[in-house]
Amino acid sequence: MAAVAVGIVTTILIIVQAFAITGIVVPVFTRGEGFEQVSTAVVVLTVVVIIRIAVSYLSEWVAFRAAADAKSQLRLGVTEHVLDLGPVWLASRNSAELTALTTRGVDGLDAYFARYLPQLVLAVMVPLSVGVVILTQDLLAAVIVVVTVPLIPIFMILIGMYTRNRVDRQWESLSRLSGHFVDVVVGMTTLKAFGRGRAQAKRVQVIGDEYRKTTMGVLRISFLSSLVLEVLAMLSVAMIAVSIGLRLVEGSMTLEAGLLVLILAPEVYLPLRLVGMHFHAAAEGLGAAQQMIEVLEQDPPRSGLDTDVPDLAQSTISFRQVSVSYLGRDEVALDGLSMVIEPNSITALVGPSGAGKSTALALLERFIDADSGSVEVTSAQGRTQVLTDFQTSAWRGNVAWVGQDPRLVSGSLLDNIRLANRSASEEQVWAALETVDLAHMVRALPEGLATRVGEAGRVFSAGQTRRLALARVFCQPEAGLVLLDEPTAALDAATEQAIAGAIRELARTRTVVVVAHRDLLISVADHVVEISTAVAR
């Protein structure tokens, strides 16, 4: 709306400015009038120039403010949608590519929102309005304008179609470079150990050179396209100028009409040329935006409307012939699973790797939907509902999860333990640490719960980190369903025993589902489900 308002004002000012210049030049050069006779036109011209400067500044301010808002909405929208899609979808994508999309990719849209779109409004309004004024002064000039103006959009479309392929290749090169660079950095220790660091550095250099060449190709096309549009506009204005000059010599046209048309003619072509220029400047951002739109068009897991989730610690969860297949994979991740998860119990999911144990947890986390079958939730009052009837966010608020590789975020130890429940008191935190057998270790730290962990902070062992993650669950009492994905993998016997004790304590007030390979965890379970056969024993 602001761009349209600025376009209307700018169009009016261009026309008034042309009449003011004509009103100064013609009387002075043809009739020898002095400043007093043309002072009104000089004042009008001065005011118009000042207003055009102010409007130009206001237009820039509004455009960049709108660009910042649009970029923020797009960046937040993509990030929130990726969170809604969940880690199962994210695992199938290149994380470096998504990072590039939400950072540099979004920033590339500055030229599109701040330059291209406002100029597009001017490219529609100015040629039409100024063309009408030219028509009232000179029919031949108006005919030339009508014939030549459409040539600029035609060439813009042709060049744009050619540029789009180059921009797509440029963005593809950047995505490949980002992904490869991240892989090299993550695996640098291994590469150095096997003497492959230099080879990978050369590979990064090759991809970087490919990106540089592609980028220079896009810039070359952009500059050449600007030249084509400039030449078209120049030749069109030259045709109008020649026709005006010939008729002025013949005396068939007045100087006032000829000068007015000659001043207005370049203004017809200028907005169209600027549209082409700004379009090429925004091409990289548009290429990234297309990929962001593809992300936003991905369907997240189905979310129902029911926000009233029953107490999952007292509810029975039943899988009925549930099958799941992942997009892009031929094999079935989960095939006809039927099982019952009893309330206030420990259910262990066992089976070979790839049988679908983590997929079953992902269903309960609402990160994926079942292709067939259903997951039913029966409350303590006997009411049965399908899992997809519940609103996703409401369901997840009643579920706690600890993965195989839990992380500590940058901050204090207290903040990390209260990560899922900021309102947890210090008494609850200490009680949770006692349960997971870490209280004595934390008390021995110089700063206790205020100890900095995560990046540039204290580093805990894998076993300590998993017990801290379990402490988070104890500080999340509203989570009646606890999902654990191999919490004792690669741990020593003493740590495994401590974690098994904490899981037994959880089952006193929660329903626990644990993916288990180790005998100790299987032995503490109340129910064991073999995913490969989906038969409970």
Image: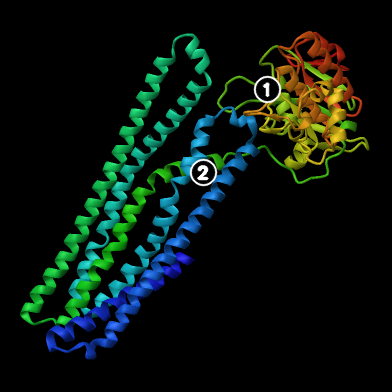
Query: What element does badge 1 sit on?
Result: loop
On the image, the x and y values in percent for residue 407 come to 68, 27
**Residue that appears at 32% across and 82% down:** 44
Relative placement, left or right, of 359 versus 212 is right
CA gap between label 1 and label 2 equals 39 Å
Residue 378 appears in the rendering:
no
Outermost residue on the front side: it is 446
**Residue that appears at 42% across and 52% down:** 112
Give the amino acid at mark 1: Val
- The residue indicated by pointer 1 is 459
Give the amino acid at mark 2: Ile
Relative placement, left or right, of 511 versus 231 is right
Instruction: Mark 1 vs mark 2: give the one in front.
Output: 1
Quarter occupied by residue 398: top right
Q: Quadrant of the C terminus?
A: top right
Quarter occupied by residue 253: bottom left
- The residue indicated by pointer 2 is 293
Residue 186 appears in the rendering:
yes
Query: What element does badge 2 sit on?
Result: helix
**Residue that appears at 67% across and 31% down:** 409
The mark that comes first in sequence, 1 or 2, is 2
